[in-house]
Amino acid sequence: MSLDATIKSTLDSSGLAYDRRGAGRYFVTLPGTKKLQTNCWLVDGDHAFSVEAFVCRRPDERHEDVYRFLLQRNARLYGVHYTVDSLGDIYLVGRFGKETVTESELDKILGQVLEAADGDFNILLEIGFATSIKREWDWRVSRGESLANLQAFKHLAEPAGGHEPGLTES
């Protein structure tokens, strides 16, 4: 079976949404829970099979802490690793010998991409975007907007002891 056929067969059997963009080029959407979806390229190149998935944009703050997290996380990832592009945006990437890519191996690779992108997403936001999250929380509260998709970051927005009447009221 050709690598292109292996990729297509794996994606079809997994039920993942994908778009074939030419021979050996697939744009795959991995569904998540924290990061609602992760877009991932699978490419059968001239000399290797590659995977590339966007995780999040360049952090606003605490860059060193974000990069430390990514480097430490790289030691525990299977087949892929975190990297940043010239703008500082964060990706998961991997390159594999074409002969090593089987349906089972591709399933493991896609599983690792999903686990890392989805599992690390809130951590990356918490480290690199805390000020923006707090500002968004305050803006929504002031306008009575829903906080549903910010609940994972409630601890960043509210004082450690919670609101105690009389402390801030005059």
Image (cartoon, rainbow, N blue to C red):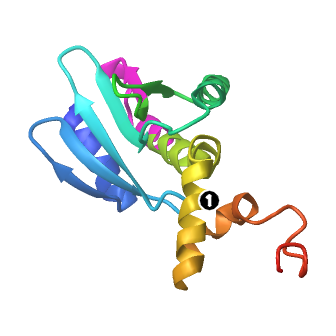
Quadrant in which the N terminus appears? top left
Binning the other alpha carbons within 10 Å of mark 1 as few (below 14), some (14 to 19) or many (20 upward) gives some
Residue named by callout 1? 134
x, y percent for residue 65? 66, 29
Q: Amino acid at mark 1?
A: Lys
Quadrant in which the C terminus appears? bottom right
Q: Compared with residue 24, is residue 50 higher up or lower down, i.e. above or below?
A: above
The outermost residue toward the front is: 170
x, y percent for residue 19? 19, 53
Highlighted range, magenta: 93-109
Q: Is residue 137 magenta?
A: no
Q: Is residue 85 left or right of residue 104?
A: left
Q: Would residue 105 be visible to someone looking at this image?
A: yes
Q: Residue at x 41, y 41 (%)?
A: 57
Q: Is residue 95 magenta?
A: yes
Residue 162, by quadrant, is bottom right
Could you say which is closer to the camera, residue 142 or residue 12?
A: 142
Q: Is residue 16 left or right of residue 63?
A: left
Could you say which is closer to the camera, residue 123 or residue 31?
A: 123
Q: Compared with residue 37, is residue 90 higher up or lower down, i.e. above or below?
A: above
Q: Compared with residue 135, is residue 109 higher up or lower down, i.e. above or below?
A: above
Q: Residue at x 20, y 36 (%)?
A: 4
